[in-house]
Amino acid sequence: MQLTGPEILRRMQENKSEPDIIIKPFDMRCLGSNSYDLHLADTLRVYKRTIPVGMKPAIEYKRGTQDLTMRDWFYSDMDYKRFLYSPNAFDIRNPKFVIDPTNPKHHETIDIKIPNGGLVLSPNVGYLGATVEYTETRNLFRTLMASPVLVAILY
């Protein structure tokens, strides 16, 4: 289901005690013809385990600087040389970077503050972001119940 801007607004105002859509803070200028524009908060989060030792999870964007090279993704020349010697050890597809949901140590994260100029993100890192706005929807999604006959056929 896609809601139009006027429908989003209507569902926010229709039932004041329990509206179908809640957006806080709400800014009418962010309401589009078929959407509401949310704003990225100023911090990203990354699982420590998914970043190879010595590599940067992101690089501060500096307008007008030369193109980035692979060297720019490392904290030191020594880390970069280790990468050149053994690139597979830095490949995020390496099983050592997989997160085990049952291991609390794998849940450790680092926060990356987004500078005013922005960041260059690595295509090989998963970033967790949040919005400035709090959003909530109610009564917009239906739970489909399988009929007993269909369930019997599937098993």
Image (cartoon, grey):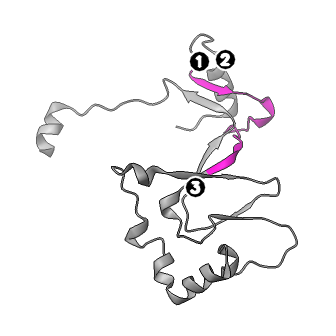
Please indicate whether residue 69 sits to the left or right of residue 22 in the image: right
Residue that lies at the very extreme toward the bottom in this rendered image = 85
Q: Which mark is drawn over residue 19?
A: 1
Q: Residue at x 78, y 29 (%)?
A: 28
User: Badge 1: few (under 14), some or many (20 or more) residues near its Cα, within 10 Å?
Assistant: some
Residue 145 rendering spot, x and y as whole percentages: 28, 31
| 138 vs 128: above or below | above
Q: Nearer the viewer, residue 130 or 87?
A: 87
User: Going from the N terminus, do you reach mark 1 or mark 2 first?
Assistant: 2
Q: Label 3 is placed on what type of residue?
A: Tyr
Q: Which mark is drawn over residue 138?
A: none
Labelled pair 1, 2 in contact (Cβ < 8 Å) = yes
| 74 vs 9: above or below | below
Q: Which mark is drawn over residue 13?
A: 2
What is the secondary structure assignment of the residue under circle 1? loop
Q: Residue at x 33, y 32 (%)?
A: 144
Q: Label 1 is placed on what type of residue?
A: Pro
Q: Label 2 is placed on what type of residue?
A: Gln
Which residue does the numbered mark 3 point to in the structure image? 127
Please indicate whether residue 95 sits to the left or right of residue 40 in the image: left
Q: Nearer the viewer, mark 2 or mark 3?
A: 3
Labelled pair 3, 1 in contact (Cβ < 8 Å) = no
Q: CA distance from mark 3 to mark 1?
A: 31 Å
What is the secondary structure assignment of the residue under circle 3? loop
| 22 vs 49: above or below | above
Q: Residue at x 66, y 64 (%)?
A: 58
Q: Is residue 39 magenta?
A: yes
